[in-house]
Amino acid sequence: MIEAINEQLLRAIGVGVALLDRNTLGFRFQNDTFRDWFADKAEAASLDEVFEELDTAALGAALSETGRYTAEIQHRKKRRRMVIAADFTAATDAGQELVVLVCQNITRIRELESMIDSYSMMVERNTRELKREKEQVERLLLNIMPRSAYEEFKSFGVVTPQLYDPVSVLMLDFVGFTEMVASADPSVTVTELNDIYSAFDRIGEQFGCERIKTIGDAYITVAGLPDPMPDHANAIANAAIRFVRYLERRNQSHPHQWRCRIGLASGAVVGSVVGIQKYVYDIFGPAVNLATRLQEFSEPMQISVQDEVAKILRDRFEIESLGEKQIRGFADQPVWRLYDSKKDIAPVRAG
C-alpha cells in the first residue's frame, strides 16, 4: 500500500525513478514516469543506451569518490526536446551494489531561463539605446545653452532668468552672405558654414567664451557667462582676432571667400531659455544691442569696439580711433578698431 502511494506521489510530481546495477548499469526498476519519458528506449538493457550523451566514465568515477553524480541530459520525445536533470546516488541492498537514478523534467525551467535571458538582453539593449539617446539629447541641449542652465532645466524644467554683469559680447556677421547663398550650392554653403562655426566654437572654448547662438550668418558668443570672468574683455578680443586669422588662413585654400565684420561690447545681459516646445537659450541687454550696432561700423575682416572696451584693451592690443559715431539706440560715442597686434600698422592708441 505504501509503495503504491509513493509511486503515485512520484508520478504526481513528475519525477522519473530508475534502479540500476552499479557494475553493469543495467536497469532493475523503472517507474511509470520514467517509462513514459523514455518509451522509445524503455526496453534498453543498460543506461548508456537510454542516455547516449551520458559520460559513463565520469559517472563511475564520481560514484566511487563521493557516491553522487549529477548531469543534465537532453532527450527528444517525438518532436519535443526534453531537458532532464539526472541525479545518481550509490546504494547497497542485501550486498548488491546499486545506483538510484532520479530524473526531473526541467525543460520548462530552461525555457523560462532562456526567455529571461532573452528579455534581459532586450532590456540591456533598450537601456543602452535610451542611454545613447539621452546623451544625444544632452549634447544637443548643451549646444544651445550653458551647462549651468542645462542642469537647472534638467532638474526643474525651467531656467530662471539671470543677470550677468559685466560680460563682453562678440557679434559676428559675414559680408555678402545673401549673394553667396543665392549663387552657390546650398549644401556646400551649409557645410562650409558648419565647419567655420565649429572652428569658432573651438577657438572660443580656448578663451572661456560661451557661444550663445547662430542666426544664419550671424554668430554670437560671450565671455563672462555663466561663470564670472574678470578678464572678459581681453578674452573676447583674443577670440575675435583669432576668428579673423582663421578665416584668412582658410580663404587661402578655399574657393569660397568668407569675410566677416565683428563688433565687441561690454555690459550687462540677461540670459534665459525662451520657448516652450522649441527651446532656445538667448541673451538680451544693452551689451548685445551695442555689439550688433558696432559690427555695422566694421569693414570686412575688421573688428569694432566700444570706447569702454578700448580703454581696457589698449595696453595689450593695437587699436585705432574711428572717431565719434552716432549709434542707433545709443548716445553718440567714440568707436575704435581693434587690430591683430602681429600686423604692421601705425595705430592711434585709445586714451
Image: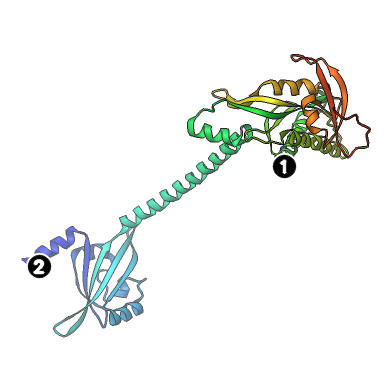
* Residue at image coords 26%, 63%: 104
Nearer to me, 187 or 199: 199
Q: CA distance from mark 2 to mark 1?
A: 88 Å
In the image shown, does 314 or 97 lie closer to the viewer? 314
- Tell me where residue 349 sits by quadrant: top right
Residue 59 location, x and y as percent?
A: 32, 77
Q: Is residue 185 visible?
A: no
Q: Check disc 2: other Cα within 10 Å, few if <14, some if 14-19, many if 20+.
A: few
Q: Residue at x 64, y 35 (%)?
A: 228
- What is the residue that sits farthest to the front in this orientation? 351
Looking at the rendering, which quadrant does residue 256 occupy? top right
The kind of secondary structure element at disc 2 is helix
Whole-percent x and y of residue 277? 54, 24
Disc 2 target residue: 3
Q: Amino acid at mark 1?
A: Gln
Q: Where's the N terminus, which quadrant?
A: bottom left
In the image, 89 versus 150, the foreground residue is: 150
Q: Callout 1 environment at 10 Å: few (<14), some (14 to 19), or many (20+)?
A: few
Between marks 2 and 1 in the image, the one whose residue lies nearer the viewer: 1
Q: Please name the amino acid that badge 2 sits on.
A: Glu
The answer to whether residue 345 is visible is yes
Q: Is residue 164 left or right of residue 129?
A: right
- How far across and down, in percent of the image, does residue 112 sit? 34, 53
Q: Is residue 140 above or below residue 284?
A: below
Is mark 2 in CB contact (under 8 Å) with mark 1? no
Residue at which label 1 appears? 206
> Is 287 rendered above or below residue 340?
above
